[in-house]
Amino acid sequence: MSIAGVVLLTLGLVLVPAQPAHAVAEATATARIHADTNAHRTSNGRAPLVRNAQMDAVAAGWSDVQCRRGEMGHNPQFSQQIPPGWSSAAENVARGYTYDRVVAAWIGSPGHNANLLGNFTHIGIGYCELNGDRYYTQVFARYSGPLPGDGASGGAAVLAIASNGALYRYPGTGAGGFGARQQIGSGWSSMSLVTGVGDMTGDGNRDVVARDARGRLLLYTGTAAGRLAGPIVLGSGWTGMNLLLGPGDFTGDGRPDIVARDNAGRLWLYAGRGGGAIASGVQIGRGWTGMNVIVAPGDVTSDGRADVVARDASGRLWLYPGRGDGRFLAAQQVGHGWQIFNAIVAPGDFSGDGRPDLLARTPSGALLLYTSTASGGWRSGGQVGHGWSGFRLLGPGAA
């Protein structure tokens, strides 16, 4: 494909913040940017853009380059790095803006806005924050049809283990539905705990952590095509844990973390250290035995910090807002009557509104969508699936 088909901007947007802000999770920032971009396109009569995992990896990699250099610039090779077969492509970059305002800044710049509203079908989004300095990348392209990795970005997916041990990934479309499922593993019946954990290795792809029958904690690294490689042994002696959770960046350092609950009801935080490594466990809670569901939907409170939601034995739903330093604020009841569900998972932004969602399964196998509100509550988004009774549902689902 000739480079002549590429629309390149020679200038990005720069706003140097007056003071550093706390880091936000990459999934939180990029989901909001995707939602704001598509809202702008929809209001201008343009079709929404599909997020693609391969394009996300290109955008994330370039944001990381800008972070390391400490200066903003364009990627001269992005058009060769995104999937081939495009008929037009473009790139937006920005520095310094908060993640909830950067799209508005692009809209206010004619050249960048032309890309936001361009005749494209797909988008990749990258975000990097280092010492309070924030860098953003959007790559756009037009393709004639769907691509491998469509819907695989931003956490919008469900992981499910079938009765035969096959591990499937069900990507969200970003509009409240599922794309075609993909088998990403086999023999997973022996894994007693499994969860998506975000990009722990820093390669732009989301990973999965599991505990095997020997009590080892294993990291399976994601690939650009949405599959899994590995495993890498993170540790042994995990038989005393009965829950694994991938809350995203719970400590505020820009790296995804792991939370585990032991048989005594204590919560332990294992901070991500980058490169697929984790720190030693630190106790961050006790008395969690009474919670029969604990999920990590993302930033429910819209403060840039990862939160946790739990269901107690009475069917009440509780929100535990994250402080951004590995601890919780006081719990808030945000629902009741949730005892009717036999599984609840956090797929990320499944509805495409820029906010985290929950999926809940009934005993009959129906899958219901619940979207979050600004107050931390949940509202019904209707039924989005059926026939899910035979699966062990896992979350968060990003692979």
Image (cartoon, grey):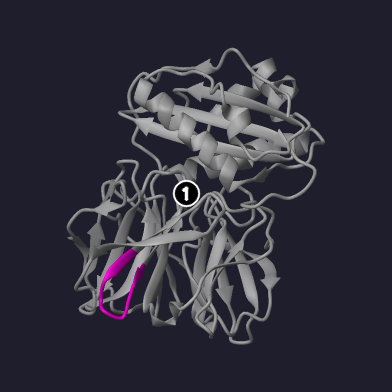
Position in image of residue 31 (x %, y %): 55, 45
Q: Is residue 270 magenta?
A: no
Looking at the picture, how far across and down is residue 25, in whole percent?
41, 44
Outermost residue to the front: 1
* Left or right: 348 as drawn, with respect to 8: left
Q: Is residue 174 visible?
A: yes
Is 31 placed left or right of 9 in the picture?
A: left
- Image quarter for residue 380? bottom right
> Residue 27: x and y, percent?
48, 46
Give, as a single range, the part of the protein colored magenta: 210-218
Find residue 109 and report its image quarter. Answer: top right
Q: Residue at x 53, y 36 (%)?
A: 58
Would residue 118 appear left or right of 241 to someone viewing this image?
Answer: right
Above or below 149: residue 4: above
Give, as a three-letter code, the residue at label 1.
Asn
Q: Pointer 1: what residue? A: 205
Image point 64% across, 50% down: which residue?
A: 352
Which residue is more in the foreground, 195 or 228? 228
Compared across the picture, whether 327 is left or right of 66 comes to left
Height in image: 176 above or below 256? below
Q: Position of residue 63 (x, y in %)?
A: 46, 30
Q: Quadrant of residue 176 in the image?
A: bottom right
Image quadrant occupied by the N terminus:
top right
Q: Secondary structure at mark 1?
A: loop
Dot 1: within a 10 Å radius of its alpha carbon, few (fewer than 14), some, or many (20 or more) residues?
Answer: many
